[in-house]
Image (tube, rainbow, N blue to C red):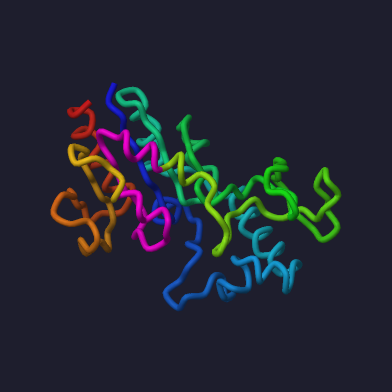
Amino acid sequence: MKKLTILTGAGISAESGIKTFRDGDGLWENHSITDVACPEGWQKDRALVLEFYNQRRRQLHEVEPNEAHRLLAELEQYFDVQIITQNIDDLHERAGSTNILHLHGELFKSCSCNDKTLISEQKSDINIGDKAEDGAQLRPFIVWFGEDVPLMREATKMARESDIFLVIGTSLQVYPAAGLIHDIKDACLLIVINPNETGFGYGQRAVVMKETATQGMKLLFDKLINLA
């Protein structure tokens, strides 16, 4: 069975109604990245950071996977599918995908602010004073800017072993995830679904579909099955 690796980003979740973190003005929900997505912001104002992610978590309870999520899950019938996602939601899981690597963490999990390996399920708000098992303040289980991405080695291995590498819903502007397309082997088929794609960074080898995630997957699904 051929290995199909899929790298997903904010664009696929946006079609389920999840607001993309970074708007055109560089603000996240009217907050700067340094306020809510960096260790420095956590040190400066923990209550602000917790409430920012509490709002994201509440919103996640209200949305559902879309057709693109569901079609990706169906591909497991035809391929050895591995999803590497930059998204922190659980929409891939809810759609039925079974092999998902969350590069940037998971909104429905929390961890100790002193030890990110102490992880808990977190479906409700995190408040100041909520403690991890080591007695430290709980924080969102999110990889912030400036922090190591511990799953990159595993993601790189997946990319290198791929027969087909599909990029969907990401402009590949956030590193190190954006570098994964440079890890695929020469014989690997590279497909990009992005309505705003300019071709920059992919070279001549990519099959580029300037479509939304859902429309692109509808157009691509049968063609992919024929490659299985």
Residue closest to the eye, 4 or 183:
183
Does residue 133 lie above or below 227 as drawn? below
Task: Magenta stretch: give its range.
Answer: 156-181
Dividing the picture into quadrants, the one containing residue 119 is top right
Q: Is residue 199 magenta?
A: no
Does residue 147 lie above or below 2 as drawn? below
**Residue at point 35%, 26% (across, down):** 80
**Residue at point 42%, 44% (across, down):** 66
Q: Is residue 150 found left or right of 211 in the rendered image? A: right
Q: As drawn, which residue projects farthest toward the bottom?
A: 25
Residue closest to the eye, 16 or 89:
89
**Residue at point 35%, 36% (across, down):** 71
Q: Is residue 197 found left or right of 105 in the rendered image? A: left
Rendering coords of residue 187 (x, y %):
18, 37
**Residue at point 46%, 51% (across, down):** 86
- Which quadrant, please, contains the N terminus? top left
Q: Is residue 161 magenta?
A: yes
Rendering coords of residue 39 (x, y %):
65, 66
Residue closest to the eye, 219 or 177:
177
Residue closest to the eye, 108 or 178:
178
- Which quadrant, please, contains the C terminus? top left
Q: Is residue 95 found left or right of 52 in the rendered image? A: left
Q: Is residue 43 found left or right of 1 in the rendered image? A: right
Rendering coords of residue 30 (x, y %):
57, 76
Count the marks.
0
Rendering coords of residue 83 (x, y %):
41, 38
Q: As drawn, which residue projects farthest toward the left?
A: 204
